[in-house]
Image: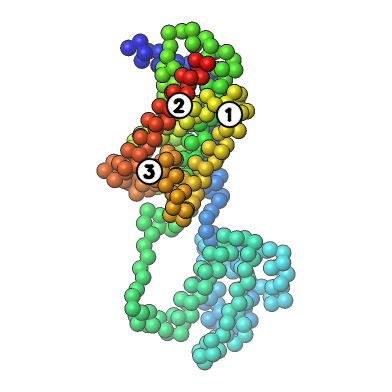
Amino acid sequence: MNRLAHILRLGFKELTSLRHDSVLLLFLFYAFTVAIYLPAAGSVIGVHHASVALVDEDHSPLSRQLAESLQPPEFQVPAALPYDQLDNVMDSGQYTFVINIPANFQSDLLAGRQPAVQVNVDATAMSQAFMGAGYISRIFQRELLNYANQADTASKAPALLTTRALFNTNLQGGWFLAVIQIVNNITILAIILTGTALLREREHGTLDHLLVLPLTALEIMLAKVWSNMLVVVLCTWISLEVIVKGVLGVPLAGSMGLFLMVTALYLFASTALGIFLATLARSTPQFGLLAIPVIIPMLLLSGGSTPLDSMPQWLQWVMQGSPSTHFVSLSAAILFRDAGVSVVWPDLLALATIGLLFFTIALARFRKSLAS
């Protein structure tokens, strides 16, 4: 009972220190509000609201039909453009796509002469240029087949491909990006909060005061883990309810309680990693330099930014030892696919095992640093 009381009181001490640290409080507020909303609402992956201009030299019903087929939210309403302005608007970057429909296009098509439509692409808008050109090609092919009464050719194909987008019907990239931003911020805060808290005590001399008390390294470490875990889990829950569901309107179908439990388990592993890095550093700036090469691979190679399947096989195996890899998988499965424990238990078991391993190593290193 004495140990539990020590851990509880030391944890309250950590919360009191955090309450008086205005910089960390401001960073917490930013990380779970602005840093979630801006990337999810502003950084859209794919084609969205792309600017289009149309040079219509044919002025036929077919050319008007092609222009009307480019609709929001993927494209803006095509702007009419004179032919002599085509090069100027492309040079100025005013439009991402400039489409030129030649004269006699409709009559040539009906005569079977296979006329060409020119699509000029500003490839400096990399993501929209690459995917948008494919979108326009498929949309125009569909419209031309329908117009030429050739839609029945699809029935002669050996197989029909039916595509269904599950859990995100409109393929809105902001939904997944909002959750990934929370995962990334949890990783950063878990490592930074615990590491800086330990180094702050060492630099201010309060760690020496703790050592003269009847406290063990395990009690000190558990106090830091549970206090920072409580803060981050609470901020995560508020951010999901207010920013992700309320402001961004992302429908989270899964169990919030299960996700917060998984978050706490992930924090157990990542806070232990933060303490381990703090025992290697002699000062807060040195801790920051040590944390950068650890945090960045955890964020970029966890499967949130790039799918694991697209990485080299050896790197996929290496990243299985990172808790962030399993946390990203668990977050998507629980929040979007409403997966239960019976489905995600392999990742849960892997995350718990990694957490215990990290905690054991960090505790051994922490005890060694206290003795030295």
The disc placed on residue 225 is: none
Q: Mark 3 points at which residue?
A: 330
Q: Nearest the camera: 109 or 292? A: 292
Query: Position of 89 compared to 202: left or right?
Result: right
Q: Residues within 10 Å of mark 2 (few under 14, many from 20)?
A: many
Q: How far apart are marks 3 and 1 (CA)?
A: 29 Å
> How is colour applied across the structure in the image?
rainbow
Q: Do the residues labelled 3 and 2 touch (CB within 8 Å)?
A: no
Q: Do the residues labelled 2 and 1 touch (CB within 8 Å)?
A: no
Q: Mark 2 points at which residue?
A: 362
Q: Which of marks 3 and 2 is in front?
A: 2
Query: Position of 270 compared to 348: left or right?
Result: right
| Residue at 51%, 68% in the rendered image | 135
Give amino acid for label 1: Phe
| Residue at 53%, 81% in the rendered image | 62
Q: Which of marks 3 and 1 is in front?
A: 1
Q: Mark 1 points at which residue?
A: 287
| Residue at 36%, 15% in the rendered image | 4
Does the image show residue 228?
no
* Quarter where residue 199 is shown: top right
Q: How far apart are marks 3 and 2 (CA)?
A: 24 Å
| Residue at 33%, 75% in the rendered image | 159
Counting from the top left corner in percent of width and height, residue 99 is at 61, 74
Under circle 3, the secondary element is helix
Q: Which of marks 3 and 2 is nearer the N terminus?
A: 3
Give amino acid for label 2: Ala
Counting from the top left corner in percent of width and height, residue 124 is at 65, 61
Counting from the top left corner in percent of width and height, residue 12 is at 45, 17
Q: Which of marks 3 and 1 is nearer the N terminus?
A: 1
Query: With respect to residue 168, does 56 lie above or below?
Result: below
Does the image show residue 333?
yes
Give amino acid for label 3: Leu
